[in-house]
Amino acid sequence: MGPPPTPAPAPAPAPPPIQPRPRSPERPAPAQIIAGVRRSNRQRQPADRNRDYQRVLDEEAARKAQRHDVREPEPDAETPDFQEEVPDIPGAFSA
């Protein structure tokens, strides 16, 4: 007969549970920093997107105003003012 079987090693004791510390009401808990993980530049804050969108709207408005200024010629003094025609029938509208 062979040697008797060796007993299995005892399982390691479980670590004690981690108790979370209560948060301070004055200051929020700091964000956890995980080594080797970096936040992507593509993940932007909503405030940044709103600011960028507003800047784009402002630039478009400025461009439209510049185009409007360029297109609109200044009125000449020689341009006659149109006089309203008097209708033949009182109270009638003209088309």
Image (spheres, rainbow, N blue to C red):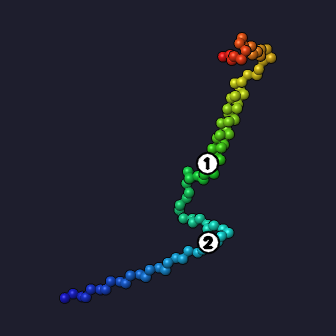
State the residue lying farthest toward the right: 77
In percent of width and height, residue 56 lies at: 64, 41
Q: How many discs appear?
A: 2
Q: Describe residue 83's horizontal placement relative to residue 19 as left or right.
A: right
Q: Residue at x 71, y 12 (%)?
A: 89
Residue 63 position by quadrant:
top right
- Most foreground residue, 21 or 39: 21
The amino acid type of the residue labelled 2 equals: Arg
Q: Is residue 79 visible?
A: no
Q: Residue at x 27, y 86 (%)?
A: 5
Q: Secondary structure at mark 1?
A: helix
Quadrant, the N terminus: bottom left
Q: Residue at x 63, y 67 (%)?
A: 28
Of badges 1 and 2, nearer the viewer stands 2
Q: Describe residue 14's horizontal placement relative to residue 81 as left or right.
A: left
The disc at residue 62 is none
Q: Is residue 9 above or below residue 33?
A: below
In percent of width and height, residue 86 lies at: 74, 13
Q: Is residue 57 visible?
A: yes
Q: Earlier in the sequence, mark 1 or mark 2?
A: 2
In percent of width and height, residue 11 lies at: 38, 81
Distance from label 1 to label 2 (Cα)? 31 Å
Q: Is residue 84 above or below residue 60?
A: above
Q: Secondary structure at mark 2?
A: loop
The disc at residue 49 is 1
The amino acid type of the residue labelled 1 equals: Arg
The disc at residue 23 is 2
In percent of width and height, residue 18 lies at: 52, 76
Mark 2 surroundings within 10 Å by alpha-carbon count, few (fewer than 14), some (14 through 19), many (20 or more): few
